[in-house]
């Protein structure tokens, strides 16, 4: 079986989730968290390594909540995304920044931990089984291994909206050949009766609820790290001193590569329904969704063994 890794981005601050760490909120019948269902699906599909991108100050609580269980069943690595983890040339310029630099930086942190094709996911998103099966097949059999040959799991917008507030999604355009043409990172998308809307200061704009969107589920090759590395320096160079909010985001990075004809992105579409804990109010509905999947036999009552405390 060909090797492939799952990279779980879990370094988010959870700012919209009050004082809790949203990635570690239990939603399963035995205290499982969302990422454990993702890991279960990925391992069943063929992935054989899990790389957790976390904050160093959360390492102890993260290992206790999930890491120790996963370490018993597969190869695990931890990498740390920190705001100061940037080239030395730029550290003084951005010394006042407190927030890490986004998903592009998160993946770049993995360069010494991943040497095989890998799939990127958000820790607090449930994607469904189909996505992992298709991604594994593409990464290990459908790709030629080029650093600029990428796959993206595309979801239907209406299957990815929260009942409790706005979300950010990458709105996508794909050609008849299944290749991605364009992606636009779009904030403040809210669910409406029979559709969706993008809220903005310049006015609300309706958006087709059947639109294809990215959920930050990308299949990449290890050669892509060099693309991220050079691009990160260009990104930092273009910022004003003290810039506090700009982020180096995977959809924006890949969208730029597409515009410059420097990459190709195969869209692997999934009809599965997404769910996630974006807001504290989401937890109850997510737990109910997980319970339903367990009752239907999609998942066992207990996903993984308890940590070995010896």
Image (spheres, rainbow, N blue to C red):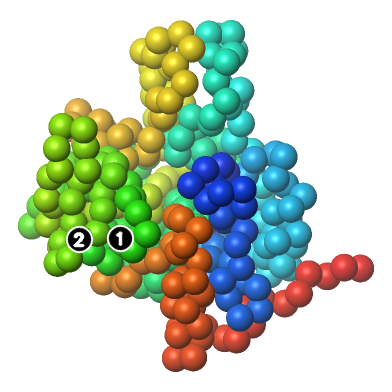
Residue matched to label 2: 192
Are dots 2 and 1 in contact, CB under 8 Å? no
Residue 77: horizontal and vertical position, in percent?
66, 50
Residue 4: horizontal and vertical position, in percent?
50, 58
Q: Residues within 10 Å of mark 1 (few under 14, many from 20)?
A: many
Answer with left or right where residue 168 lies relative to residue 278: left
Q: Secondary structure at mark 1?
A: loop
Pick whichever of labels 2 and 1 is earlier in the sequence: 1
Of 238 and 257, the residue lying toward us: 238
**Residue drawn at point x = 29 percent, y = 42 percent:** 187
Q: Secondary structure at mark 2?
A: strand
Question: Is any atom of residue 115 visible in this view?
Answer: no
Q: Which mark is residue 161?
A: 1
Distance from disc 2 to disc 1, alpha carbons, whole Å, reads 10 Å
- Identity of the residue furthest to the left in this view: 176
Answer with left or right where residue 154 lies relative to residue 147: left
Answer with left or right where residue 91 lies relative to residue 133: right
**Residue drawn at point x = 57 percent, y = 15 percent:** 96
Give the quarter of the figure containing the C terminus: bottom right
**Residue drawn at point x = 40 percent, y = 10 percent:** 240
Residue 140: horizontal and vertical position, in percent?
41, 60
Q: Residues within 10 Å of mark 2 (few under 14, many from 20)?
A: few
Question: Is any atom of residue 27 visible in this view?
Answer: yes
């Amino acid at each position: 079986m060909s090797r492939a890794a799952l990279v779980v981005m879990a370094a988010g601050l959870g700012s919209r989730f009050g004082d809790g760490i949203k990635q570690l909120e239990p939603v399963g019948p035995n205290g499982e968290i969302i990422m454990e269902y993702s890991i279960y699906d990925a391992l069943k599909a063929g992935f054989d390594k899990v790389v957790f991108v976390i904050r160093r100050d959360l390492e102890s609580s993260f290992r206790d909540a999930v890491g120790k269980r996963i370490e018993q069943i597969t190869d695990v690595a931890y990498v740390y995304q920190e705001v100061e983890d940037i080239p030395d040339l730029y550290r003084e310029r951005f010394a006042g920044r407190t927030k890490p630099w986004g998903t592009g930086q998160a993946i770049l942190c993995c360069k010494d931990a991943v040497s095989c094709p890998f799939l990127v996911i958000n820790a607090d998103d449930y994607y469904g089984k189909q996505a992992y099966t298709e991604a594994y097949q593409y990464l290990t059999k459908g790709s030629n291994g080029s650093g600029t040959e990428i796959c993206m799991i595309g979801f239907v917008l209406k299957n990815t909206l929260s009942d409790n507030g706005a979300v950010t999604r990458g709105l996508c355009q794909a050609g008849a050949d299944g290749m991605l043409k364009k992606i636009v990172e779009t904030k403040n998308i809210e669910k409406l009766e029979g559709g969706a809307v993008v809220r903005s200061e310049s006015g609300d704009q309706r958006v087709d609820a059947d639109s294809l969107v990215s959920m930050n589920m990308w299949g990449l090759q290890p050669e892509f790290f060099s693309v991220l590395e050079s691009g990160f320096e260009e990104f930092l160079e273009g910022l004003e001193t003290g810039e506090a909010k700009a982020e180096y985001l995977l959809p924006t990075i890949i969208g730029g590569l597409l515009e410059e004809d420097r990459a190709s992105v195969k869209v692997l579409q999934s009809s599965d329904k997404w769910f996630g804990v974006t807001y504290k109010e989401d937890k109850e509905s997510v737990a109910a969704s997980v319970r339903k999947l367990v009752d239907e036999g999609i998942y066992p009552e207990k996903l993984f063994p308890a940590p070995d405390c010896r």
